[in-house]
Each structure stands twice: as C-alpha cells, then as structure tokens.
Amino acid sequence: MAFNSFQYALLLFAVVTAFWTLRNHPRLRLGLLLIASYVFYGFWDWRFLGLLALSTVVDFAVGVGLGRTEDGSRRRRLLVASVGTNLGILGFFKYFDFFIDSFAEISAQLGLSLGRPVLEVVLPVGISFYTFQTMSYAIDVYRRNLEPTRDLLAFAVYVSFFPQLVAGPIERAGRLLPQLEHPAERLHPEDVSTGLALITLGLFKKVAIADALAGYVEAVFSAPETHPWFLVLGGIYAFALQIYADFSGYSDIARGSARLVGVRLVRNFEQPYLSRNISEFWRTWHISLSEWLRDYLYIPLGGNRRGWRRTLVNLSLTMLLGGLWHGAAWTFVFWGGLHGLYLAVHRMWRSRTPGADPVMPRWRDALPVLGTFHLVCLGWVFFRADGFGNAIAVLTTVGTFNNPSTPVDTSPLILLAAAMVTMILIDVEQRRTGMHVPHLHRPVLRGALAGTAAAAVILFAGQASVPFLYFQF
Amino acid sequence: MRRTLSTMLAAGLVLLMFEGVAVWLEPRLPAVQTWSNPFAQAKFEQISTMSAGRDPDLLIVGSSIANAGLDARELGARLGVEAYNAGIPSSTMEVWAAFAEDAVFSRSCPAVTLIAIGIRDANANLPGIERALARYQQSEGRRRSLGLAGGPFDDPFGWLEHQAGEASAFVRLRPLLREPGLVISWLQEGRAPGWSDPSRDLDSHGRYLRFGRRAFDPVDQLAEVEHVFADFKVGGLQEDGLRRLVDSARASGGAAVIIDMPAMTTILVDGIPAGEERLAEYRTWLRDFSTEKRVPVLDLTSLDDREELFADLYHLNDDGVAIVTDRIADWLRENQDAVPLAMGAKSTC
C-alpha cells in the first residue's frame, strides 16, 4: 500500500479515528496499530509478514535474555543471534542472487565453469529498514544504553509501525518505544495541523515534483546517447531532485501520519542540497541511516580515534557498506565508495578548517554549495544507472557535449526549472525558519502558496503511479 | 478567523486563476487522448453526434489506407445513400472489428460494409499486435463512452476523477498541461511532437484529408517498408479480426465486401522487404479467405504502381481517391445481386 494511494488515505483515516476513540484502552490502541501495520505491509505481499514476525520475536527474546544475564560471553552469543538472524534475512533476500551472480561471473572470467543456482529471490519491501531498526535495539540493549522492554506488543509495533515501516526513518527504540508504551492521552491541535501539513507537503513533493520528473529521468537514462548533452545534464539534475523530493516526501508523509497518532518520528532530511561540503550533506541527507552507520559501524570500527589513516579507511568502509545497503549492485557499491572518497578528502581538508553545523548559506557560500551539489550529482549518475556502461554513457554524453543541435522538446526543461525553484523555495524557507513545514506569516501569501501547491498536486496526480524509490532498498 | 478566511480566499483565487487559463486554452489545444487511438476517439465522437437520419447505409472499415483512400461522402452521393468512413490508422483488423461494433453495429445496421485491405494491413507479425485489441478495449475513453467504466462503488477514485474532469477544464486538460513545452509549441505552430488532433483533418464523413495532393516520394518510405515487412506472415490475429468483422457485418443484417486496395508494389519489390513471394502469399490468403467466407472481393490492384495516384507507398492522393471511388461505385451498381446497396437498400435493424 503506497502513501499516495486511495487505500492509504482510507486506512489512515480509519486508524486515526479508532486510535483516539480507544484513548482509555492503551493495549487495544497498540493492538490496533499492530493490525494496521500488518495490513499495510500485507498489501504488498502477505507472505513476508512471517519475516517481520520472526525479526520481532528474535530481537524481543534477545532483549529479554540480555536483561537477565550479566555473563559477558552469554551476552555476546545473544547479540550474535540477533545480528546473525537479521543479517541472515537481509543477506539471503537481498544479496543472495547478487553474490552468486558476481561469483559466477568472476569464475567465468577465470575460465572456470561453475553452476549457478537460480533462486530468483524476491526482495521483501522495506527489509533493509526494519532489520536495521531491530538490530539497533539489540545492540543498544547489549551496550546497556537501553533497558530491554518486556512488552512484546509494544515491541512488535516498534518494529512494524506502519508510517515508517518500508522506507524509514530508521527509528531508535530509545525514542520510539516510550512513545508507544505511553501513548498521548489526547490529540493536540498542533499535532493535527502539523501532521496534515506534513502529509500535504510530502504528497506535493512526491506527486508534483518527483513523479513529474520521473518520465524525463527515465527517458534520459534509458538512452543517453540519443539526447543532446544539455538535456542529459538536465536529466541528472532532475534525478537529484526526483530522489530528494520522493524520499523526503515519503519521510514527510511518514512523520505526518505518525503525528496524527501522537508519535513524533525523527527528521530524516534537513535541506541537504544547501550543504556547503560533503560532511554537511551526510549530516542532512537520510539522517537516520547516516546516524545508524555512524553509531553501529563507523564508531565500532574505531571512528576517528586511531589516527587519520585508520579514519579514512573507516570512512571508506562505512560508505562502501552504506552503498551496498542501498541495493545489490556494484553501481551502489561504487556510489558508496565515491562518497567515502569525498568524505575522506574532506576529512583531510577539514583537519585544517573547522566543521560547522547546517546554517543558512550566504551568497559567498554559493560556490561551495554548487560544488557539493555537483559532486553529489556525479554520485547519483551511478546510483540511478542500470550499470556502469549506462553511467559512463550518461557522463560521456555530457562530458563531450554530444548532439548539441538535436531538436528537443523543451517541456522537461521547463518542468525541471519549475521543480528546482519550488524545492529551493521550500528548503530555504525551512532552513530560515527552522520549521518542519514552510511557515508563512502573511495569510495571502500562505493562501497563494497553498493554492499553487493544490493546483500542482491536481495537475500531476492520476498519472501512472510511480512507486516510491526507496521501497526497493 | 479572519486570517484563515483570507488564506482560503487567496488559495481559492489561485485555483480559479488556473481554471480560467485552462478554460481559455481548451478550444486552442487538441482533445486529450483518452482512447488508445486518436482516430477512434475522433470518429466515435463524430458518429455519436450525427443526427439519427445519418446512420450509415454504407460503412467503410480499414486502416490508414481506407481512412485516407476512400471518399465516403462522394460514394454516398453517387449511390444515393448515407456512407461513413470508419477506417482507423495504425490499428489491426481486430481493432477495426471492435471499433465497427462499438461505434456502428451497436446502434445501426449498414446494408453494406466495405473492408478495405492492402498488403500492409495483412501482416500478423506486427510488433505488439497481440496487445492491440486489449489496449483498445481497456482504454479509459472507450470504457467511459460505452458506459463500461466503474461507478462510484466499483472504482471510486476513477469515478471521482472523471466527475472532477466533467466539472473542471483544469482537471480535464491535465495530460496536456503537464507538457508546457508542447502547449507552447501547439499554440505557436499548430503542432507538437506526439500530439495530434484528427478531428481537424476529417471531413464530415470520416475521411482523412491530409494526404490530399501530396506528391509521391519513394525515398522517404523505405524505412517504413522495412519495419512493416521485417517479419511478414499472413493469417493469425489479423485473420481472426477479419473473420469477426465479416460476421459482425452479416449479423447486423448487411453484406460484407472486401476491397483489395492498390499499392506501389514495384517499389516494395525493389525495396526488397515485400518481395514477389510475399505478394503471392498475401493474394493467396485473401483469395482463400474470401472463398471460405463467401465474401466478394473487389480487386483494385490493377491500379498498382501508378505513381501519380499515390501520396506514398500505400496511401492514395486525391487523384487516386477519385479513380477508386469511380471503380467502387461502378462495381456496386454492377453487383446488385450480391450487394443490394445500388438498389437503394437502406440501413435497417
């Protein structure tokens, strides 16, 4: 069930209504959220509900076990059971075919003809998100950063909470579990207004920007050689906007939906394309994943505590695995490696210049912001391409200024310009006010913006539905 | 409260402004394509708005070859009957049959149905042929026009969208407005890549007029020939469609006649892709089919290869249309036993 579907609107309405009707029955409320979450997930493929339940039961039991023992080796074994189960599920469903194919290709190149088992494993939606979420719980309990919960129902909702189940944000149990165990007793008007505003903003980003650009991006990436270079360059920018509007739009709808049942999810994006360097980009892009990788991979590897050489290795390794997390393809690994390289270079540079938290860029920051954006765009080419050949074809077409005089339809470029201006306005306003949604004080201006947003949603809604991009991860 | 009202008023005004622009644009842009084939959409609309007395006694079906090459108005005038050209370009015989049933046989009973076929129409291995009928039948516009689309309970979202489209030009025009570059191009030059407005180019009896006086130029056509004849085979789904068409024409109480349309066969042969072998295969198939189904065939292939009659390899220009019209009118008069039209038979159900 996608957020931009009629079914989801009905489900959300029914859940929110029932949730606040049951305000004196906290267990029933949790039961309601669990059923809604399993229905939501089962709409894609009910067969994979078993995996969700398995991950839930294993990590709950591991948590209980960790709470009962102080024996170090027993605690380690329990942690291994949790990590092994989750990585086992992830590895089989997401990476089995990838590694078998890669192994077979390497064998063939070495002249060995090895049989290739064909399983064609189906990738369950959102598996990367919920396995990371449950693993973080077990690791936090193991590290004694978190008291294990003894409430299986609340834990099951934590693992499967429908607004963030299939594409994040990846929530930490320390933040989300207490909100589920002690739900709000009354619905605050601010929760309603912010929730609805976030859902509207998310739908606008998804339908009017991401989906509107999807056709242009597909046309350019499916046959880059046949297009003039400037249209291909525009296609790269369009994908940068598409993936941002799509994923941040999803996160906005997730946060807005959760807010309607009194739950506050973490912010997953903080205007990443306004970043002045690549470190800032990763502090503002897919924040919940960046923080997960930092806390559970980069720091355990040693972080920046073991000298600059080891720091660079740790950064690169973390980003390579981050790339692989996004998809079972070497182009994703390359994308992660490229960002690891960016971060390593920036790290060396930054040792001489202090880092800074995201602030509103000034005019003098234009060059660093544009430079960072273009470095990110270079990475997006590999992220979006069907393979290295496709990525090279895209870059070659742009780099050699290919087909400059081919007649073109200017529609996509007009759309791209409109989408770019709109996203810049939204981001600048959010960065300026620090608000979750653009907050304009003048009613006429606010009304004009709402009217334009509504017109854009009407204009682009009803096309063939484009799935949210991050579902595949 | 005042601030909320001001916000809502401003939002409403902006939406009204968008609606105003759409209302202004609508007559200046082509119709939004809701059928799988724009000609089917335009002709269905044309037939639906005809007065009851204009139900066709003589129906012409076929592809672009019929669409441009048969002058229903002139033919009807010569024979003293109502005639309509229901040819649908870029379609298969299954689609010809389905469209004839949807637009004509479901509401009237032509005395004669002329099925115009050329070698180009007979290829059963056209890419995508197996999906052509389903695409036609499932298109939203057709389902709406025939009352087959879901209601508020079967398909609430689709129904709501349709109702909104009925009420608002902005909603109706969305597929066009999503392409602002093409809108500008259409307003400035009257054309845009991928957009068409067949209703501008049809006469009142369904004939497509654009080929008109176009001069024949063989060089432009060779790529098209290679595409059509790359994998040539007669029969298959095309024959199924033809069979269904003949049966439907007869089921509505009329007679079916096949017209074997002329083409520039020497160019086809010289251009290699068609070849004598394929021409022979096509003619044998057509003869066998007409024998089996007892359908008379009016053979116009004696006009093959007369360059001055053609706009391109298959489509007749005005001179070609005039000669063909003469031949058909004469043939119908001479074959009154098989085809009662010349005796003044009218559409009756």
Image (cartoon, coloured by chain):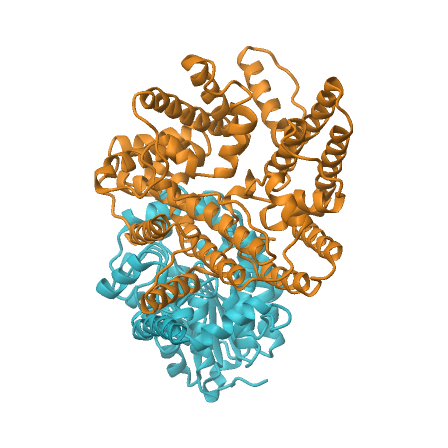
Q: Nearer the viewer, residue A407 or B200?
A: A407
Residue at the far bottom: name it: B53
Residue plotted at (32% across, 75% down): B20
Position above or below: B237 against B213 = above
Position above or below: A131 against A76 = below
Image quadrant occupied by the C terminus of chain A: top right
Q: Is residue B225 visible?
A: yes
Picture coordinates of residue B83 (x, y %)?
A: 44, 79
Picture coordinates of residue A82 (x, y %)?
A: 70, 29
Q: Is residue A262 left or right of residue B170?
A: right
Q: Nearer the viewer, residue A277 or B181?
A: A277
Residue plotted at (43% across, 64% down): A458
Residue plotted at (73% across, 23% down): A75
Q: Nearer the viewer, residue A359 or A5?
A: A359
Count numbered badges in the picture.
0
Picture coordinates of residue A383 (x, y %)?
A: 44, 34
Q: Is residue A7 left or right of residue A419?
A: right
Q: Is residue A91 left or right of residue B324?
A: right
Picture coordinates of residue B75 (x, y %)?
A: 39, 77
Position above or below: A367 against A449 = above
Position above or below: A16 against A91 = below
When asked about the image quadrant of residue B2, the answer is bottom left
- What tint does the image give chain A? orange
Q: Nearer the viewer, residue B330 or A80?
A: A80
Q: Is residue B126 visible?
A: no
Which chain does cyan denote in the image? B
